[in-house]
Amino acid sequence: MEHKDKKLKLDLDFLGEGAPKKSEKKGSHQPSHKSTVDESAMSDGAKWTLGAIALGVLIIIIAVSASSGDSNSTATTNTLPPPSNSESLNDIFDTSETDVEAETDTNSYVPVAERTQTTPVVQTPLEICQERNGYNATYDSATNSCGCTAGYSLGATSQQCVNFTVARDESCASQWPGTSFLKVDPADGKNICDCEVGSYWDSGRTACYSLSSFNQSCVNSYGTGAYSTTEDGKRVCDCGYGYDWDIERNSCVSTASINAICEKDVGRNSRYAGYVEDGKYICTAPY
């Protein structure tokens, strides 16, 4: 029995070495297992609640920061602030030049009624004559007609008061184109007209033309090689150097072409003699 009690005591002592110590406070007692479980459960719930609250606060802070960042970004993008309610576009842009032009146009405006009610200008008879016939025109109240001052006469074509020489030239040119005053005929005192320098009378002495005009007329009628000349005081056409009339005298042909006919019909070196008989070219004898 003694050995059993001793072994039991040793076992109890051995177990006591690893066992937790009790609280040294007097009168205190170890809480029951149920109470420890409840406090542990309440601690976890509080943690979850606090965690949720912290997470919500963090989300709110992030949202506020993002909103503040967008607002700052927008403010830096718009370089010019919009005008206030009391600020107009004229305060931003300089429109002084446009305003001046508008005022000028308004001040220079003349009502239609004032423009149409102008007093008509009344011309004197002398002013009317001078407007028609030039500065040297006069007015005759006795005949109610216009005239020219001394030394001037009314031009036939210009209808202006010009000196006598110009007036005579215009008188000749109006009757015979291309002519001018030459002299006064002593027999009857009439003006004698003649062609101007470089111009010539036509065959009927009805007008004057330049020599180039006559030549061109001959070419138009008789072909290349024709030219204008005078015969018995009249203007006629003839064939120039290197050309001769054809057999019918209807056109000018080259002399070389006639010589070719003579060589063919008469013989080598035969040439055109310069005239036509019995409807044939007369050719020289060959040599």
Image: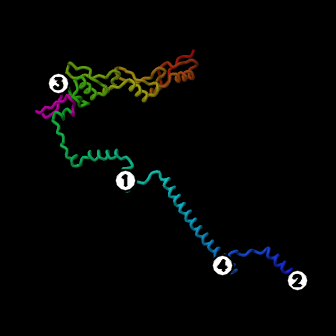
- Percent position of residue 152, x then y: 20, 25
Range shown magenta: 131-151
**Residue 145 on the magenta segment:** yes
In the rendered image, residue 86, in percent from the top left (x then y), is placed at 36, 55
Near-viewer residue (132 or 43): 43
Label 4 near label 1: C-beta < 8 Å?
no
Nearest to viewer (mark 1 / mark 4):
4
Q: CA distance from mark 1 to mark 4?
A: 72 Å
Query: Sequence order check: which comes first, mark 1 or mark 4?
Result: 4
Residue 20 falls within the magenta-colored stretch: no
**Disc 2, SS:** helix
**Amino acid at circle 4:** Asp
Q: Earlier in the sequence, mark 2 or mark 4?
A: 2
Q: Is residue 208 above or below residue 75?
A: above
Of badges 1 and 3, nearer the viewer stands 1
| Mark found first going from the N terminus, 3 or 2 | 2
Q: What is the crowding at mark 1: few (fewer than 14 residues within 10 Å), some, or many (at least 20)?
A: few
CA–CA distance between discs 3 and 4?
149 Å
Q: Which residue is mark 3?
A: 150
On residue 87, the disc is: 1
Give the residue at x 46% y 24%: 225
State which quadrant residue 236 falls in: top left
Circle nearer the N terminus (2, 1): 2
Are the residues flagged by discs 2 and 1 in contact, CB closer than 8 Å? no
Q: Looking at the figure, which quarter contains the N terminus?
A: bottom right
Q: Alpha-carbon distance for marks 3 and 2?
A: 191 Å
Q: Mark 3: which amino acid?
A: Ala
Inter-mark Cα distance, 2 to 4: 46 Å
Q: Is residue 112 above or below residue 194?
A: below
